[in-house]
Amino acid sequence: MKAAVVVFPGSNCDRDVAVTLEEVTGTKATMVWHGETKFPQVDLIVLPGGFSYGDYLRSGAMAAHSPIVRAVKDEALRGVAVLGVCNGFQILAEAQLLPGALMRNSSLHYICKDTGLRVERSDTIFTNAYAVGEQVTMPIAHKDGAYFADDETLDRIEGEGQVVFRYCPKDEHDGDGNPNGSCRGIAGVIDETGRIMGLMPHPERAADAALGGIDGRRLFESLTRGLH
């Protein structure tokens, strides 16, 4: 599996994703600068976490109009898989490649902690190494991570199976498990084609046992299976 990782001014998880991809696939990812206008031939494009363009205007709003995101749209139309993590999810929503929007956390504070997630689907290219209903742990690190959509959109994406991950309590002390006030606890969604996914938690930060957990590694393992 050949992958490209987009680098924006303010990206801070691009190298983490690249390291995880190389460890899982055995192949180095290509780093693509935001000012580029095309990609090499790849199977997967990753928009990583960080604070693209300093999160001016809205998180992801400026990046959504960068030259490389126009190329992301072109590649997605050709069927190339696209994964947006945290800021990458915000960019995909701003670019209207995914439904909904990412709003300010209900606490109005930046949150950085491990969170519980429930796998809602295991039949996608992003989740085939998980089981439906399985509870996993991945960290979040964001201030604008509350997923929002109107009720009609929420009903539609729920009905069409576009909700892939949902927040859940990590332990008995975690309340309702919804750390940021996301509508219906939504943490990750896919588009109608099943080839584009946005996820607020960071799987690349949960891909090495030495760093505290490997639940996120299986997302990348899923992609190696799903894209072959």
Image (tube, rainbow, N blue to C red):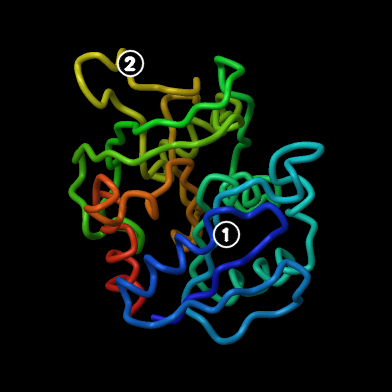
Q: Residue furthest toward the bottom?
A: 41
Q: Which amino acid does label 1 sit on?
A: Leu
Give the SS element for disc 2.
loop
Classify 10 Å Cα crowding around label 1: few (below 14), some (14-19), many (20 and above): many
Q: In which quarter of the image is residue 40?
A: bottom right
Q: Residue at x 24, y 53 (%)?
A: 210
Q: In this view, does 217 lie above or below 91?
A: below
Q: Name the residue beneath numbered marker 2.
A: 176
Q: Residue at x 28, y 42 (%)?
A: 119
Specify whether 27 is left or right of 217: right
Q: Quadrant of residue 188?
A: top left
Q: In this view, does 113 lie above or below 9?
A: above
Q: Residue at x 33, y 21 (%)?
A: 177
Q: Name the residue beneath numbered marker 1.
A: 47
Q: Is residue 27 above or below residue 138?
A: below
Q: In which quarter of the image is the N terminus?
A: bottom left
Query: Pointer 1 and pointer 2: residues touching (CB < 8 Å)?
Result: no
Residue 7, horizontal then vertical, whole percent = 64, 64
Q: Which residue is drawn at 30% across and 56% down?
A: 207
Query: Looking at the image, which is closer to me, 92 or 106?
Result: 106
Q: Quadrant of the C terminus?
A: bottom left
Classify 10 Å Cα crowding around label 2: few (below 14), some (14-19), many (20 and above): few
Residue 86, horizontal then vertical, whole percent = 53, 45
Give the SS element for disc 1.
strand
Q: Which amino acid does label 2 sit on?
A: Asp
Residue 146, horizontal then vertical, whole percent = 55, 28
Residue 189, horizontal then vertical, whole percent = 46, 45
Q: Earlier in the sequence, mark 1 or mark 2?
A: 1
